[in-house]
Amino acid sequence: MISASSKESIKAHALSLGFSTVGFTSPMLPAATQSGLQEFLAGGNHGDMQWMETNAERRGDPKALWPQAKSVIVVGHNYAPEHNPLEKLAHKTMGNISCYAQNQDYHDVIKKKLRLFAHWLTENFPCEIKLFVDTAPVMEKPIAEAAGLGWQGKHTCLVSREFGSWLFIGSIFSTLVLAPDEPESDHCGSCTKCLDICPTQAFTAARQLDARRCIAYLTNEHKGQIPLEFRKAIGNRIYGCDDCLSVCPWNKFAQTASETAYHARENLKAPLLRELATLNDASFRTFFSKSPVKRIGRNRFLRNVLVAIGNSEDISLMDAVTPLLDDPSPLVSEMAGWALDELQKIPASV
């Protein structure tokens, strides 16, 4: 087993690379976590995310992912925004993009740092490693909880006493034998603010999410048309939703992210819906260069923008919608029809 001093040097190096927090755990998950995943999938709560079902066995058991692993080094990267994202919901003619997507893709940022960390690790402690950043069948949140980085809040996301609900997670699986840290205990208490604020009532209970009702899922992951029952609740959220994260009382201890790659780009802070509605495929990819928004493609994004326009109560946006009635993509043209119908319901004096 690696000595306590060596373990501290590993932690110190991780922090020197810019990670906000680091912890250590074994590559194992409690049986309750594995059964919870099976219940989630059996209920169809994952919606279109078939990749969760395909890799369910490996996702529920880290040792199945890589049997040689002896320990997991878990890092957290603070991405707390400068302002409360809830403030933007009142500006109905502007698009509200989840704060994690207002600049560079965190996968790229963290993976670059993890590679530097892994190189140092293998040079100083001969071992084999595999690194992951939300792109493999790894249950990051339970592993991070086991490593002491925080606890899985009632909104199902990780909560930290130091960073609130604003931590990205990365992990290095290693053949090194490292003493595990103490898991973090639950500090949510009787608070239910994250559950109560959800616009679409996506939480069926504490720590139980029906992704099919979640705005982040509907705008980011869902490939089809957004169901009618959720469109008004989406408001001006055109990519993701930060409501349950933003309202967490533990955020009062969070400090704005020091990583400049997470600071909001000016054109993504509150883009005008009118301008977003004009994006073609090429201009969409340019506008969202290096942003995770680019992954969903122009058509799904404009679908989201048109939902927001339909909720804007601004009849001057009709002329931005009309050209999209003939868009080649049914996702866009059908939602343009809905948005126009919603705007036509508004009295001209409003």
Image (tube, helix red, strand yellow):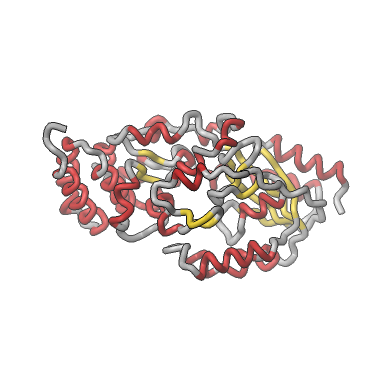
Residue 113 visible in rendering = no
Q: How many marks?
A: 0
Q: Is residue 65 left or right of residue 279?
A: right
335 in relation to 187, above or below: below
In terms of image quadrants, where is residue 311?
A: top left
Direction left: furthest residue: 348
Vertical relation: 88 (above or below) 340: above
Q: Nearer the viewer, residue 160 or 101?
A: 160
Q: Position of residue 70 (x, y in %)?
A: 77, 59
Q: Residue at x 30, y 50 (%)?
A: 231
Residue drawn at point x = 51 percent, y = 67 percent:
41
Q: Can I make out residue 6 in this image? A: yes
Find residue 229 and report its horizontal and vertical position in percent. Answer: 31, 55
Q: Quadrant of the N terminus?
A: bottom right
Query: 223 or 123: nearer the eye?
Result: 223
Q: In the depicted view, which residue is nearer to us: 241 or 106? A: 241
Instruction: Please indicate whether residue 184 sits to the left or right of residue 322 in the image.
Output: right
Screen quadrant of the C terminus: top left
Q: Quadrant of residue 289?
A: top left
Q: Residue at x 54, y 39 (%)?
A: 248
Give the image location of residue 217, x and y in percent: 42, 54
Residue 216 x %, y %: 43, 50
In-image side of 285 versus 162 (left or right) = left
Q: Is residue 330 above or below residue 99?
A: below
